Image (cartoon, rainbow, N blue to C red):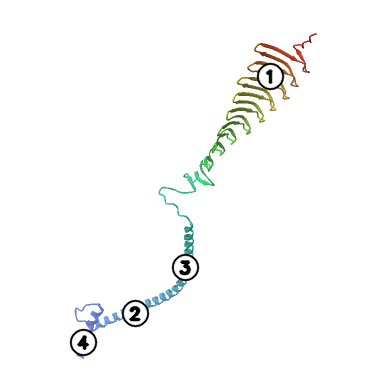
Amino acid sequence: MKKALFWVPAILLCVAVAGGAFVATRIPTPQSVAGEIDKKTKQLSDENEALKVRVSQLEKAIQDSNRGQRANKAKIATAVSGLLRDIEQTKTAVDKIAAAKEKIPEAPKKTGIVEAQRVVLRDKNGKERAVLSVEGQGTTLRFIDANGRNRMELTSDDDSEELRFFGSNGRERVELMAHDASGMLSFSDGNGKKRMALAAGDDSGELRFIDADEKDRMRLMTAGDTHELRFFDANQKERIRMLAADGAEELCLFDPNNRKRMGLIAGKKFGELSFIDQDNKQRMRLMFDKKYEGLYLYDPSSRERIALLIEKEFEGLRLQKPSGQASWPPPRRPKK
């Protein structure tokens, strides 16, 4: 019995050191050893319960994780299938782009050059203000106002150039055209109707003034050695014509029916002034040349009735009857 009690303190010391609960500073009593054993037993029991709870929670988490993994596997499989399909479509599109790119001719590599078929300049509001474009066989440069209306347009093609200016209402005001063998400049009013036009060719030129009804009112023309000025009324009837040619000048006046009523001709060695009636019959003529001057008056049938002649050494007056018989000077009687 005494031997058994001798080993008790040693066993308790080993338990205390192994559990880390206390450090032996003195030899414990049997009562204190029993209390410590109960305390340790309760602590181990509590820890065991806590472990059971944690094991239960872990098992539940594992079950939930398995269910989630199965759902996630289905989602992942669907996503992977869609991704593979997109990859295949992308590859097909890339192949098409690569095939199309091979057909495009390689642009020349030039430093500092911009190549395009249409260039647009916009203002801060995004509106087009200038456009440079290639259209058909020509090139066009347009300047546009804030209201979207053309204000200036420059066009050039294989055989002509054209410059046009527009008013704020979009109507053409000035047009300048140049062809291989001719040029033209015109001015229009606020309604876009041409009021003046100037044209020039290799050996000719023309200046026209036009009214609001787009009818010529004055026309000045030149061609070679001939120059002509004409005036027209509101009905487009010629009223005045002035003609200058090599060696002669002419002035003609016309009535509202476009019938010539007066004509004046001046040459280097002669001149003539004539008056014509409404039936286009000559009624009076005044003329001269190097040899004589004469004044002639005619009846409605264009028969000469009076003639006044002046020559270098002779003056004479001649009167004639409607029948054509001379009444002055009186006819000479035959000699007996």
Type of residue at label 2? Asn
- Residue 201 vs residue 141, the one in the foreground: 201
Residue 6 appears in which quarter of the rendering? bottom left
The residue at 76%/13% (across/down) is 327
Q: CA distance from mark 2 to mark 1?
A: 153 Å
Image height of 36 relative to 176, above or below: below
> Which badge, 3 or 2, is on the more N-terminal residue?
2
Residue position for label 1 = 285
Image height of 333 relative to 120, above or below: above
Type of residue at label 1? Arg
Residue position for label 4 = 7
Q: CA distance from mark 4 to mark 2?
A: 30 Å
Is label 2 in contact with label 1 (beta carbons under 8 Å)? no
Q: CA distance from mark 1 to mark 3?
A: 109 Å
* Secondary element at tag 2: helix
Question: x and y percent of residue 326 in the render?
Answer: 76, 14
* Secondary element at tag 4: helix
Image height of 291 relative to 39, above or below: above
* Secondary element at tag 3: helix
> Which badge, 1 or 4, is on the more N-terminal residue?
4
Specify few, some or many for label 4: CA neighbours under 10 Å numbering under 14, 14-19, or 20 or more: few
Determine which of the numbered discs, if any, sits on residue 84 in the image.
3
Quarter containing the C terminus: top right
Residue position for label 2 = 48
Type of residue at label 4? Trp
Q: Residue furthest bottom?
A: 1
